Image (cartoon, coloured by chain):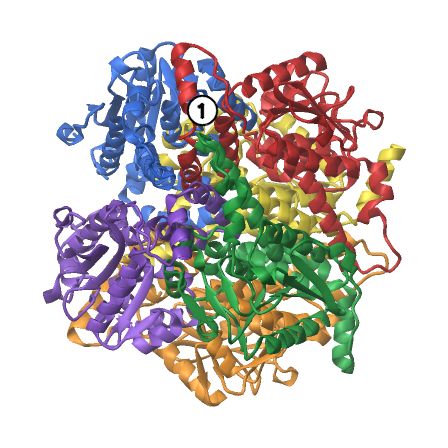
Chain colours: A yellow, B blue, C red, D purple, E orange, F green
Amino acid sequence: MADPSRYDFPAIQTTFPAPFVAHVEINRPKNYNSFSPDVFSSLARVFDRLSEDENVRCILLSGVGKHFSAGLDVKSASTSGPVSQTTEGEDIARRTWKIRRHMYGYQDGINAVERCEKPVIVCCHGVAYGAAIDLALAADIRYCSKDVRFSIKEVDVGLAADVGTLTRLPKIGVSYSWAKEIVYTARDFAAEEAERAGFVSKVFETKDGLIKAGFELANFIATKSPVAVQSSKALFDFSRDRTVQDGLLYTAAWNSPMVQSDDVKKAMMSGVRKTKSTFEKL
Amino acid sequence: MADPSRYDFPAIQTTFPAPFVAHVEINRPKNYNSFSPDVFSSLARVFDRLSEDENVRCILLSGVGKHFSAGLDVKSASTSGPVSQTTEGEDIARRTWKIRRHMYGYQDGINAVERCEKPVIVCCHGVAYGAAIDLALAADIRYCSKDVRFSIKEVDVGLAADVGTLTRLPKIGVSYSWAKEIVYTARDFAAEEAERAGFVSKVFETKDGLIKAGFELANFIATKSPVAVQSSKALFDFSRDRTVQDGLLYTAAWNSPMVQSDDVKKAMMSGVRKTKSTFEKL
Amino acid sequence: MADPSRYDFPAIQTTFPAPFVAHVEINRPKNYNSFSPDVFSSLARVFDRLSEDENVRCILLSGVGKHFSAGLDVKSASTSGPVSQTTEGEDIARRTWKIRRHMYGYQDGINAVERCEKPVIVCCHGVAYGAAIDLALAADIRYCSKDVRFSIKEVDVGLAADVGTLTRLPKIGVSYSWAKEIVYTARDFAAEEAERAGFVSKVFETKDGLIKAGFELANFIATKSPVAVQSSKALFDFSRDRTVQDGLLYTAAWNSPMVQSDDVKKAMMSGVRKTKSTFEKL
Amino acid sequence: MADPSRYDFPAIQTTFPAPFVAHVEINRPKNYNSFSPDVFSSLARVFDRLSEDENVRCILLSGVGKHFSAGLDVKSASTSGPVSQTTEGEDIARRTWKIRRHMYGYQDGINAVERCEKPVIVCCHGVAYGAAIDLALAADIRYCSKDVRFSIKEVDVGLAADVGTLTRLPKIGVSYSWAKEIVYTARDFAAEEAERAGFVSKVFETKDGLIKAGFELANFIATKSPVAVQSSKALFDFSRDRTVQDGLLYTAAWNSPMVQSDDVKKAMMSGVRKTKSTFEKL
Amino acid sequence: MADPSRYDFPAIQTTFPAPFVAHVEINRPKNYNSFSPDVFSSLARVFDRLSEDENVRCILLSGVGKHFSAGLDVKSASTSGPVSQTTEGEDIARRTWKIRRHMYGYQDGINAVERCEKPVIVCCHGVAYGAAIDLALAADIRYCSKDVRFSIKEVDVGLAADVGTLTRLPKIGVSYSWAKEIVYTARDFAAEEAERAGFVSKVFETKDGLIKAGFELANFIATKSPVAVQSSKALFDFSRDRTVQDGLLYTAAWNSPMVQSDDVKKAMMSGVRKTKSTFEKL
Amino acid sequence: MADPSRYDFPAIQTTFPAPFVAHVEINRPKNYNSFSPDVFSSLARVFDRLSEDENVRCILLSGVGKHFSAGLDVKSASTSGPVSQTTEGEDIARRTWKIRRHMYGYQDGINAVERCEKPVIVCCHGVAYGAAIDLALAADIRYCSKDVRFSIKEVDVGLAADVGTLTRLPKIGVSYSWAKEIVYTARDFAAEEAERAGFVSKVFETKDGLIKAGFELANFIATKSPVAVQSSKALFDFSRDRTVQDGLLYTAAWNSPMVQSDDVKKAMMSGVRKTKSTFEKL
């Protein structure tokens, strides 16, 4: 079992409800789970630890309470951080520089989900606005409940999304025409539209049903060879951004030691014998 | 209001039916709005001007009359231009060179729509063949009416599409298997198939309904912060073609001055006060 | 007519049922058409020859008998090849090196389908597991029959797919969330789900109906100008992996001599006269 | 002979001193040939015309008078243009946006030299500072006279070079360590150091000797097949920025019609017969 | 002045000998400054802090004592770390996985020098072997003393260099033929050869002279606008790896706010008035 | 020892003068070792075999007799091959298509040298023109004798070089200005200029001295760990064409199994004991 004490960070709650499965929840329900600076930095720390934790093979990501997340905590953003804290007469270049560093920090919180070696299933429910979408797009598998209201809210606060939505949305297989419409209008879209567009791959009646199904999937993935599953994630994301030829070269370099794994023998054997394999930690 | 006299080019009609909204129409209805050389060069000039016109925030693109466009004007192509005007004994290299320059010119007309800083909503109706598809694919949002007949016609005239269809079609989120089928066969496909495939994101009963809905969308987008909307377009298209990491680096460089915009304060305020913001020109 | 004697390779049967149309079938029905080393190497040789065979314009790919293919022949993989043939005390680096070379060989068999100049229509039926998916993803157009059971099986044998699935799946326009789910779980999916996801573009009631429709499509494509069709394939696949700008530059370089083809005149003429063109071999 | 009246633009003087050779000179000697806005826009127009002028095969680029150019005209930059013309209370995002558009305009003037189809030989003499370096780096061949004083001056005016120096300098084969030193320090470097570093490929005693040698080279290049020379430039610059594999694919697409040129036969014949060929215009 | 207490890490000594200048020294002189795990991790932490330290504008990197560094500490590598600590019967895939994670850690120590926002001048003296070369290649400017003995030692210990030499060496402007020779043979090369090849840009008689000249350069760079210098570094390294077009787009996005800096006015003024500017911290 | 009978191909002579060292010679001395179609196809076959031959670790490439090679055999090119064999009225598109396929074949012969897993030292002597340069640029290390006359001859026969010179020359660390000059003028350059430019890395008095030194280098490289040397080549060439980040990712994937090689232990031991290691075949 993973050691919960290593995951004690503000604004994010991490539990280990089943063997090899972690549950990460945004934990600011009184604030609609909005993203304070803590959320970004805790996300980075939690997912970087999960990435190397041999007791974890699959991660469920959701929000404590009714809502997944209302996105950036506008109140906290307007009272702290380089965007709000302007000094009279401050040099534009220096201020911009600080904001850019600040953005890298926020991007890093989101990127941690994508660079995490383990698959991440995100379960969206209630409100999922703005930064919540950036976060969901960095996950591997997107599920939602019927009550969800998605919105790529940034345009409505005078911003272009800057922590990942605009970079990842053209690469998840949705209609580019639809993607641009929902970004330019900042309009809400519901579960059914999200599923039809391919934004989420399954919809569930209730949050409870969603979380239950999420755990079933997570538990199932956790029974698989972690060498196989985690290699698949790494090769998928590398290939998505590069030519097929580069994807194949990287695959051969990566996989040539991996296929020597004991997991292959075990998995083949259990296929033949119709038994279940238990795989070593990774 | 934009100054209409700056947009007086042959074969393309540009009007400004609402504040911050431009309507660009291919204007050769007697010729099925087919693409004469004028269409390509006027497109480039019109969209390059719209791109920098502070009185424009969103553009609707359609055809005068029943049809969007029948594609390349075969008659004009066969009587002018380097492909048709062959000189006895002309050197193949030189002729090919001239044709390549000519293609760059045609590509430039289409590219102007993509490089235009403002979102472009294309409304397809009636016949939308060949070059009409290249054009539609360079727009941001694709809508159509029920009467539309699409066809990537080029194979039927002995050609591979060369002004953008083959480069953009693999990147708009449609099934690659379907895309190749419609290209190799040059067969017609109708509104419903186009919507199911994700080629268009909405279908309307009539051309009138289509144009009306297009304007509603355009007007709505025009109420948003132009800093936010136009930054979104720029970051979307850059990211589509590059790695996620490069997309994020570019986003941070681009957006760090943009988030200092007055639009952010205005937009947040009006979100709180439930009022409407008016944004400065851009 | 193509010369069948040039296509006599083990494990792959190649026939020429109609003018300009080839039928390639995996021919190990007693072994569920599983991929022995012969299958990979024959695929490379057959498709490289078809690529330059002027009597071939379109290729149908399916399996002899009930099943398309059960994927890698685990029995043969476990008794031959560098993965299974381990020598006591063999150096890990050297063994890994041999396996990598071996993978390049397998990748080459699959890549031959993509680099084949002629369009390939794959018809999936019965079982289509593991390497069968890698193969199907390298084809241009994917059709299937209702009885098909797809599975990206590799994770269930302790492996990440290494001959193309993970590199091509993010680029065929399916939901990335769905793609990752079916890879991480190695679960079966049926015809309807495959069609809804955009993995295949058409489903047919029976294998017979599938093959019949496949031939109709192949025959139809074979009536088109091969200059136009094969240029389209080349430009499509180059563009998929690169920026729009590079796609357009390559298109102009490629297409500027091609538009001087006699096929253009013939095709235009027959369009006007409503006759059928016959195109020279390529 | 090229038609001089088509090249009548402010701040740039274009003459045609020999068959197929153009001489472009920055023509603001009273201002040390510094770059006013006119220089940038005239450069773009002149080189875009030369690019398609069949009477031109090679271009010499230098400055009228003693100096090549002192770089950006600081006086004009500080009294016009979006950087200097600040309005009280102007929105930072909007001002930044205008500056970025402005930079694209400046970059376009420099890029025109690189995208010009014909080889450009730049002859640097006297002062060659700041934007003069950006310009020289966009040329094909760099020569200088002994009196030259180069400096990548931007850091000394509080700027990073933004019209090409930082993008092209890492790609011209000089020591990256040296390149960074001269950029970070903004120090002068003389002809000898420039030659040793590979920044210029030849040094001449005087400006006169430099220009004479430049014309000899230009005249010599102008006797060669323009198909061969201009194809070489195109393939060189495409390849510099891409993988070897993409370079080779593009080369094959580009060159397969070009090798059918009459120039090949002529050139081979004259090689055999030791005569001089005359090539058709391009 | 920077706060030295924030830079107290094992194996690396960081001092601040002059305003805005930091001196980072590898501090294991009894072990020839060889790279223990501490060296890698301290490098990452020190340079990441320097990167954001507003009291630092330029960094000198050298070794305490006679030698720069003998490279990887083979003794420590052979008693700790995943390569040496093999468990009987350990799964090859898992062991390889741990080694790969370990390499990322080592690469990160070296990358920190390149991603550091401030220019880094490396001064090589005495022995500079193996990892010392990887480190030197990540710096901006390379100087050395006459006594230096360089060697890309990895091949002599049965390895390919894996923390940066093979990735950066083809991009610093040295002859690729020479680079491959020194890598394949692992032979020593001295100061003069290094300078002739462009590997270092200056050679000094003694270590003292080297360090003195290094500080003069560092002090000089530290007098320049940090907005200008640090932007130059960022744009240089981004551009080195990408197309000229992408470099220019990124430059315009990055630089359009930067040119609004007060530094520009100050620098221009002091240029006119021949005075020295003092720039705000960054 | 390698088996000479596997290397019996026309126009290329392959011998094995020392353990683990192969000598490949262009063997058409009566024709100045010019490149007939045989030379290209034999190069591909010979180097592809050497690449996987465990008895070979380093390859010397030179010409039989006085000259390295005069480049393309113009006589044979003008009597066979698709360029010369024109049929009256042949379709331009089809002829171009055949020429492109033909070029891919020629490129393949040259590429085989670069994709060969083992280092290739090319020794240039006498005449080294046209295709000889393409070939030399695909090798790892370039040496020459004083009598050599290099020329990138293609422009003088009305062609742009199309089998690699224009793609590889911008990437070997020579001055881009110099590179363009020698390409556009097709002028000769001698040993000293080639060395100064970094085109070759060493010059020898005579052909005999050159070959002798080449073998000394080859023998020396052949004593090193083949895992280390061949991994270095692979990682070098991958990195040259890609971002530093991609280079590092690929390096970590490739090298994490390689560092587990017995060669590391052997090499370290022999370093300590000052003995010579003998490495297993690869």
Residue lying at 22% horizontally and 71% vertically, measured from the top left: D127
Q: B280 or B176: which is nearer to us?
A: B176
Q: Position of residue F218 (x, y in %)?
A: 67, 71
Check the image and name the residue furthest to the left. Answer: D30
Among the 4 quarters of the image, the one containing residue F245 = bottom right
Among the 4 quarters of the image, the one containing residue C141 = top right
Q: Position of residue D277 (x, y in %)?
A: 33, 53
Task: Assign a secondary structure to mark 1.
Answer: helix
Along the horizontal axis of the image, is E18 left or right of E123? left
Q: Is residue D99 visible?
A: no
Residue C215 lies, with reference to residue A103, above or below; the image says above
Q: Is residue B93 visible?
A: yes
Query: Which chain hosts label 1?
Result: C
In which quadrant of the rendered image does the N terminus of chain F lie?
A: bottom right
Residue C182 lies, with reference to residue D57, above or below; the image says above
| Residue where numbered disc 1 is placed | C263
Kind of residue indicated by mark 1: Asp
Among the 4 quarters of the image, the one containing residue B36 = top left
Q: E17 or F112: which is nearer to us?
A: F112
Residue lying at 75% horizontally and 57% vertically, measured from the top left: E95
Q: D203 or C211: which is nearer to us?
A: D203
Q: Position of residue E156 (x, y in %)?
A: 69, 73
Q: Position of residue C60 (x, y in %)?
A: 65, 23
Q: Residues within 10 Å of mark 1 (few under 14, many from 20)?
A: many
In which quadrant of the rendered image does the C terminus of chain F lie?
A: bottom right
Count of number-bearing discs: 1
Q: D193 or A132: which is nearer to us?
A: D193
